[in-house]
Image: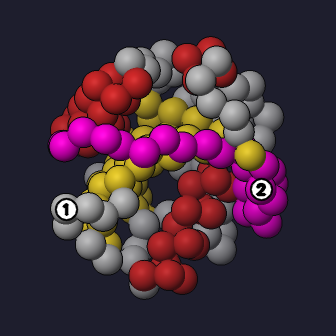
Amino acid sequence: MPYIVDFQNVSTVGLEPSPVAEALAGLRANEARYYKNKYDHVFSVRPASEAPETLDRVNRILSDERSIVISSRPLEVTSFEVNGFRMAYVFYESGLSINVMYGVEDGSKRAVGFKLSQGMEVPEELASSFKFARQKSKLAGEIRGSYFVIKGEY
C-alpha cells in the first residue's frame, strides 16, 4: 500500500528498522518537498517487497554500470515519470537513498544519485569509488551525496 510522504509532518513510517530512521525520514521528506515544489508531484513510497520490479531495475543498473551490489536491506521504493524523466528511488535500512534519473528522450540526462542520511557511515561498496559532497537541509540535517552518469540503455 502506498504511503504519501508528508514533508511538513515528517514521519518514520516504513523506516522504523533503520538505525538512522529519523534522518532517513528527513531525507525522504526532503525529496518529497523537492518534487512537490518543482513539479507539483506527490511523492509516495511503498515497501520494497511490493514493487520488486523497481528494485530489480535499480540493482541491474548499479550492477551493469559499476558492479555495485548494495548490502543493506531495501525498505521502500518508488518509481514515477515527471517532466520527461523516469525516476526510481530506493531507501535502505542503512540510511542510504539511491535514485535513478533516466531521461526518456535519447541524449537526455541519465544518472544514479546516492544520498547518505546524517549519522550513517559511507557504505563499504561505495567508499572507494565515490567522494560525497555535503549539503544542508532543514528536513534532513546534513545530506552527503554523489552520483555517476549512466552510459548504457535501460
Specify whether 116 is left or right of 15.
right
Check the image and report above or below for 126 versus 23: above
Answer whether residue 135 is magenta in the image. Answer: yes
Query: Depth check: 141 or 153 in front?
Result: 153
Q: Amino acid at mark 1?
A: Asp
Eye-nearest disc, 2 or 1: 1
Q: Position of residue 37 (x, y in %)?
A: 54, 83
Helix, strand or loop at mark 2 = strand
Query: What's drawn in magenta, residue-wise?
Result: 134-154
Helix, strand or loop at mark 1 = loop
State which quadrant residue 147 falls in.
top right
Q: Is residue 15 visible?
A: no
- The prevailing secondary structure element of the residues shown in magenta is strand
Judged from this view, the residue extending furthest toward the front is 107
Specify whether 29 is left or right of 111.
right
Q: Position of residue 16 (x, y in %)?
A: 59, 37
- Residue 106, disc: 1
Query: Depth check: 23 or 98 in front?
Result: 98
Specify whether 32 is left or right of 4.
right
Q: Is residue 86 visible?
A: yes
Distance, label 2 to label 1, CA atoms, is 31 Å
Residue depicted at 74% across the width and 30% down the height: 120
